[in-house]
Image (cartoon, grey):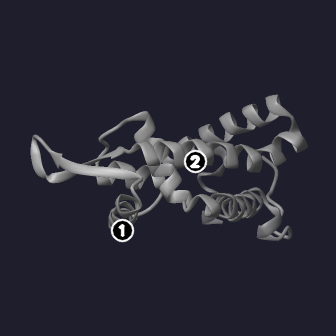
Amino acid sequence: MSRPNFEIPLARRFGGALKLAQHALRTRLDEALRPLNLTAPQCAVLSALEQEPGLSNAALARAAFVTPQSMQGILVNMEREGFVTRSSDPNHGRILRSEVTATGREALMQAHYAILEVEAVAIDLLGEQEVARLAGTLAQYAEQLLKGKIPPNLEGENSR
């Protein structure tokens, strides 16, 4: 690998550009979801529960990229809004299992359309096939980072 160019500002390198795109995406998602009385983490919770009803607080926190403590407050608000119901786990009384209500399903359906409008910017820019390819590549990238993978040719780089 060639010597890295540290003269390029961090904001212009891959990680900086990715973070900028993530921030812009989150800002636009928040704007699109606001009329539905939903936040991005609440939408992630509804989506996760749509796929797997009864998920625990900890599993929902992972799905929404928040702490378990934050998830507790999110779920309380969602229950108050009528988006979810929570009940005790039959095998472990201290665990609360959450499920989407009819109101939550309707809000999620509207959220799917709002999210599609935001994602349409990427499709207009790159095309559907490239967006699908990029999404797959980013998922693989995230998986490798979470595994702690470092390319062999960079393992000793930071010791110089």
Look at the image and tell me whether residue 149 can be seen.
no
- Residue type for callout 2: Ile
Instruction: Name which residue lies at 36% across and 63% down.
Output: 80
Residue 45 location in percent, x, y? 45, 50
Name the mark nearer the viewer: 2 or 1.
1
Q: Looking at this view, is 59 or 79 the one in front? A: 79
Within 10 Å of disc 1 (Cα), the crowding (few <14, some 14-19, many 20+) is few
* Secondary-structure class at tag 2: loop
Look at the image and tell me whether residue 55 can be seen.
yes
Q: CA distance from mark 2 to mark 1?
A: 36 Å
Q: Looking at this view, is 30 or 160 the one in front? A: 30
Residue 6 location in percent, x, y? 80, 67
Apparent side of residue 9 relative to residue 79 in the rendered image (left or right): right
Name the residue tied to disc 2. 150
24 is higher (above) or lower (below) than 137: below
Name the residue tied to disc 1. 73
